[in-house]
Image (cartoon, rainbow, N blue to C red):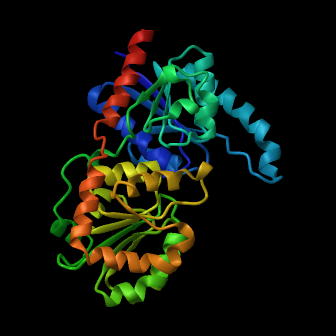
Amino acid sequence: MANRYIISGGGTGGHVFPAIAIAHEIKLQNPQAAILFVGALGRMEMEKVPAAGYSIEGLWISGIQRRLTIDNLSFPFKVISSLWKARKILKQFKPDVAIGVGGYASGPLLWMAASMGIPTLIQEQNSFAGLTNKWLSKKVNAICVAFEGMEKFFPAYKIKITGNPVRREMLVDLPDKVTAREAFGLSPEKPTLLVVGGSLGARTINQSIEAALPQLQDAGVQIIWQTGKAFFEQAKHSSQANDQVRVFEFIHQMAQAYAAADVVVARAGALSIAELCCVKKACILVPSPHVTDNHQMHNAMALANIQAALVVPDAEAKQVLSAKILALLGDEVMRNELAANIQLLAKPDATATIVGEIFRLGKNSA
């Protein structure tokens, strides 16, 4: 069995956490495996990957801005630098398979790996493929996707529909609600809301929750609130007089947070939806309008159309989100229906299936 793997990509939690989930599954199935991550300098993977117990190398790479900037002028030099460093890393580490999860760093690393004859696989989380993965698709050996219809982006013969990798703690029995709430210092009995704006935060969701704090407090609602870095201090200040709110820049114990919640408010990124399906939670999705081809709205409406989630457009969140939260917290029948329907979409074996493809590639190249 192949036993050396490079995993590359990142930039947001939607790329980083699937990558870490893949690494954990590789180690679970092959404890002797050596794994190295390659990320983009200055991006969140440079912090989150070491925290998960893996080594990471950084490339000097970023995206192209839509306006003329110094970063754009330096982009060709970044690409050349990253390709050179990627080649050096690959020659030193000698991976049996290189895996890309999307994000800036996966472009040069996977391109160079394929050029060197190393078996390559990319994992696309979204229903609309990212630019890096589209660019790589002609070079790589295999493409794991979460949605039907991805042949409009990728060569059909390379595609395997696997679902999205989910952090392993979401795939085992969650803690019971009472224990989870007590872990956050909250009452076991009061209705509890989990707000997750993504790993980097979501301004509209944060501002909507901040405006709704008095109304939610009056209704006795407890809140576990992941704000992201940019809004953290403001949220702490806004909620300091409310002892029913727990504010976090980033929640490390997400399984506990999900377990504590009656309702979850989240963006509609592919990873968030995959986790919500596995943890069977009633949710209100506020799709980000700042993504390629509005794919978060497509993701959200796919759930709404089968009564598996409620959807609030970003532009309407400040006006209607608090009322939607209170209505759903007050309607147990609706919560149970949403939870039952979203569970039908869960693909708990996705990570193991992806790792099976990785091992197949490694075995075929041996």
Residue 18 in view of the camera: yes
Q: Is residue 81 left or right of residue 161?
A: right
Q: Residue at x 42, y 46 (%)?
A: 17
Judging depth in this view, the residue of 332 and 10 nearest the camera is 332
Quarter of the figure that contains the N terminus? top left
Q: Nearer the viewer, residue 39 or 328?
A: 328
Query: Is residue 105 shown above or below 43?
Result: above
Q: Quadrant of the C terminus?
A: top left
State the residue in front, 206 or 91: 206
x and y, in percent, of residue 330 in the image: 26, 78
Side of 32 relative to 99 (left or right): left
Looking at the image, which residue is at 52% across and 78% down? 318
Q: Position of residue 264 (x, y in %)?
A: 35, 66
Residue 240 visible to an observer of this rendering: no
Give the answer, above or below, for where 208 lies relative to 93.
Answer: below
What residue lies at 60% left-to-right and 38% top-to-bottom?
105
Q: Quadrant of the rendered structure where residue 338 is?
A: bottom left
The percent position of residue 315, horizontal first and vertical second, equals 57, 71
